[in-house]
Image (spheres, rainbow, N blue to C red):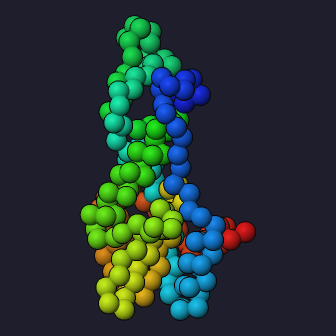
Amino acid sequence: MAKGYTQSYGIDYQETFAPVAKFNTMRILMSLAANQDWPLLQFDVRNAFLHGKILEEIYMDYPPGMKDSIGMKVCKLKKALYGLKQSPRAWFGRFTKSMKAFGYGASNSDHTLFLKREKWRITTLIIYVDDMIVTGNDQDEISSLQQYLAFEFEWNNLETSNIFWVLK
């Protein structure tokens, strides 16, 4: 984990960001799923921030214990790490790009809601940092999405009973 607290504004980062779903969007999606009897699936991406690619040059000190054997050198990061201010945005950028490549569009009202519609069928995915909820009336598409996400990212399939932490 990088020591993000040592970064300085204007030098190390420009702004912080986290993909957080709007509470009203979550409520509407849960209500829609309940009223339409759609399945609710919840996933947690393992080490989500490690999936992001860093666009600028970032260096960090070697982890403690390695300095003695290597000397006073630094590491140039090739990908995001936990603790960097840039990591959440890098993760969400990669996730958004993957979802668009798989045919999903981002909602105009909530950038964390992704939709795929084909005639009367709809599949939705909403993300909250590294947790996501999938629902819809197209079971084949939901299965395809699960396979795609498993290929793209390492994730855990969580129990649907855990979904309701969002509504509390």
Rendered residue at 54%/26% (across/down): 9
Please, which residue is most extreme toward the right here? 168
Q: Say whether residue 157 is visible.
A: no
Q: Position of residue 140 (x, y in %)?
A: 32, 84
Q: Say whether residue 93 is visible.
A: yes
Vertical placement of 116 versus 139: above or below? above
In the rendered image, which quarter is residue 147 located in?
Answer: bottom left
Vertical placement of 115 versus 58: above or below? below
Q: Position of residue 123 (x, y in %)?
A: 40, 79
Please, which residue is most extreme toward the front here? 108
Vertical placement of 3 versus 90: above or below? above
Rendered residue at 52%/46% (across/down): 17
In the rendered image, which quarter is residue 54 located in?
Answer: top left
Comparing 10 with 33, the one in front is 10
Vertical placement of 92 versus 133: above or below? above
Q: Position of residue 86 (x, y in %)?
A: 46, 38
Rendered residue at 35%/82% (across/down): 117
Q: Position of residue 146 (x, y in %)?
A: 36, 71
Rendered residue at 50%/25% (across/down): 10
**The C terminus - image quarter:** bottom right
